[in-house]
Image (tube, helix red, strand yellow):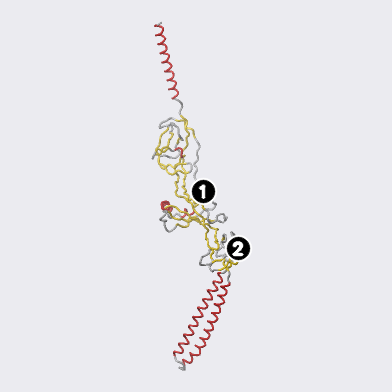
Amino acid sequence: MTRNYKLFSVLATQISLLLFLGVGCREKTAKVGPPSEVSVINSQRVDVPIYQEYVGQTYGLADVDIRARVEGWVTGMYFKEGAKVNKGTLLYTIDDMQYKTRVDQAAGNVASAKTEVARAQSQLNRVRPLAEMNALSKMDLDNAQAEYNAARARQQVAEAALQNSQIELGYAKVYAPIDGIIGISNVRVGDYVSRINSNILSTISQTGTVRVRFQINETEFLKFMRSYKGEQSVRQDVTLILPDNSVFSEKGKIDFANRQIDPETGSITLEASFANQSGLLRPGLYVKVELLASNYPNAVVVPQRAVNQLQSLYQVFVVDKSNTLKVRIVEVGPRVGDMWVITKGLEANERVALIGTAALSDNSKVTPIEAKWTPVVPGKGI
């Protein structure tokens, strides 16, 4: 019995050892499998423009406030609000009774002054020959001449007062100073207006060309001036994005920058103009202005997910001819669209692995799967 038990123990030990070795061999065999499949793309060279967006507001080429220049009751309104008006169109009339009275009074003063001038002229004509014959003294001639000069001066004052009265009477009729679209009227017939309160009756805007004002910070302004100094082409490289995210059909140009940086905000105001023959734009719209900030010509680009960032280092996995992964440290530029600009460390047409979260490391063997990738280069308005 004892001998059989020992024999059974030896056999059990050998069987356990064989089973252990068999499992170990299977695990070892499982670890040595085919290389992992990895998607691979070719790095490419493209021109990469970098656009910057700024919030702006639209204005008419001219936005003219119509104001009352005399005081009185509004007696008439002769336009349709929101319609186009031409220069010289009658817009409002203001009660002109008092101004007509002033004109009549001033006209009477002019007539009286002319009578005085005629009398003084007649007196001077009588005195002058008598003084020349020494029938009258030189003083009498001087007095007659002075009286005539004073009468002429009073006539000039009266005529100036008449002209001023006529001008004020003319202000009782308000005409459009420019062609454009007139806005909502701030007064109605029967309202009292006064030049003292500087009433804005309405506003006319010229919208054939629209101005857009926007602000950029001082750092961007300096970069902009250094990059494009003397280049007139950039003045045309302005795109307008409307509130519904659609792109306005006309391209604009930068007309000017303000004379100073705002010390409170550290920004400067720029103005661009856009042709608006369609009439789509109106003053007061909040829009986005897109400017070409910089350009990377013939830049090497890869998909953003091909770049791994480790703190301040950036790396890509390059697949060599033997289908082995090689870690490559690179220097990067901006991310644009779905791509990342590589400024150093990678050339065009190198095979780059899209590893993602795969647990692969340097010198790993892989099975490359060619993937199609076309860089999406943002254009103006994208």
Query: Residue tagged by mark 1?
Result: 381
At a point 41% along the width and 51% down the height, the residue shown is 219
Query: In this rendering, which labeled residue sits more in front, label 2 or label 1?
Result: 2
Instruction: From the viewer's perspective, tell me whether residue 169 is left or right of residue 324.
Output: right
Q: Looking at the picture, how far across and down is residue 42, in whole percent?
A: 47, 37
Does the image show residue 243?
A: yes
Residue 121 to residue 67: above or below? below
Relative depth, front residue between 381 and 38: 381
From this viewpoint, which residue is outermost toward the top? Answer: 1
Q: Looking at the picture, how far across and down is residue 121, in whole percent?
A: 51, 86
Relative depth, front residue between 240 and 157: 157
Relative depth, front residue between 215 and 277: 215
Q: Looking at the picture, how far across and down is residue 277, in whole percent?
A: 56, 56
What's under tag 1, amino acid-wise?
Gly
Give the CA separation, mark 2 to mark 1: 39 Å
Instruction: From the viewer's perspective, tell me whether residue 267 is left or right of residue 281.
Output: left
Q: Residues within 10 Å of mark 1 (few under 14, many from 20)?
A: some
Query: Residue tagged by mark 2?
Result: 79
Q: Which of the two discs, 2 and 1, labels the residue nearer the N terminus? A: 2
From this viewpoint, which residue is outermost toward the left? Answer: 312
Residue 138 to residue 78: above or below? below
Does the image show residue 181?
A: no
Q: Are marks 2 and 1 in contact (CB under 8 Å)?
A: no
What's under tag 2, amino acid-wise?
Phe
Q: Secondary structure at mark 1?
A: loop
Q: Residues within 10 Å of mark 2 (few under 14, many from 20)?
A: some
Q: Looking at the picture, how far across and down is residue 297, in whole percent?
A: 45, 46
At a point 51% along the width and 88% down the height, the residue shown is 123
Quadrant in the picture for the N terminus: top left
